[in-house]
Image (cartoon, rainbow, N blue to C red):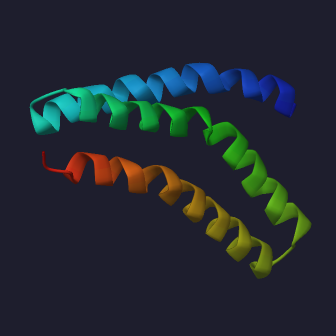
Amino acid sequence: MPIAIALLLCIPIGFLAYFEARWLIRYLMGRYESRERKAARICGLFGASLVPLLYCFGYIEQEFPGKTGENLAMGFFMAASWAFAGPVIAILKKEE
C-alpha cells in the first residue's frame, strides 16, 4: 500500500486510540476531568502518528541492513513512543 493511501488511515486510528484511552482512563481512574481529557488527546495523537512512525521504522531498517538497522529503528520507535508516553504519565500522576 502506498504511503499516501496509508496516511488516510491516520484519522480513524487516531480517533480509535482517543476513544480507547478515554474509556480506559474512566475505567481505571474513575473520573474524567480536564487532565484526563488532555492525556486522552495525547494518546489519540500517538495513534494518529502510528502509521508514519511505522513507515519510518521500516525505512530505517531498509536503509541500514542487519542488526544495526534493527537497533536504530527500535531506538527511534522507542524514543518516539516515550515522547508521547512521558507527558501522559506526567499528566495522570500530577496531583492537584
Left or right position of 42 against 50: left
Q: Is residue 1 visible?
A: no
Seen as rendered, the residue at the extreme left is 30
Q: Is residue 52 above or below residue 94?
A: above
> For the point 35% across and 28% down, which residue is it?
20
Left or right position of 41 against 81: left
Q: Is residue 81 above or below residue 26?
A: below
Answer with the quarter of the image where residue 86 lies.
bottom left
What is the total number of numbered labels drawn onto the structure image?
0
Location of residue 78 in the rendering, given as x and y in whole percent from the top left corner: 56, 63
Location of residue 59 in the rendering, given as x and y in whole percent from the top left corner: 84, 55
- Please identify the quadrant where the N terminus is shown: top right
Q: Nearer the viewer, residue 26 or 59?
A: 26
Answer with the quarter of the image where residue 32 lies.
top left
Seen as rendered, the residue at the extreme right is 63
> For the point 12% across and 45% down, which residue is it?
96
Left or right position of 84 against 96: right
Q: Nearer the viewer, residue 61 or 19?
A: 19
> For the point 21% across and 53% down, which residue is it?
93
Q: Is residue 43 visible?
A: yes
Location of residue 91 in the rendering, given as x and y in whole percent from the top left corner: 29, 47
Location of residue 70 in the rendering, given as x and y in whole percent from the top left corner: 72, 71
Left or right position of 25 against 11: left
Answer with the quarter of the image where residue 4 lies.
top right
> For the point 63% across and 70% down, which residue is it?
75
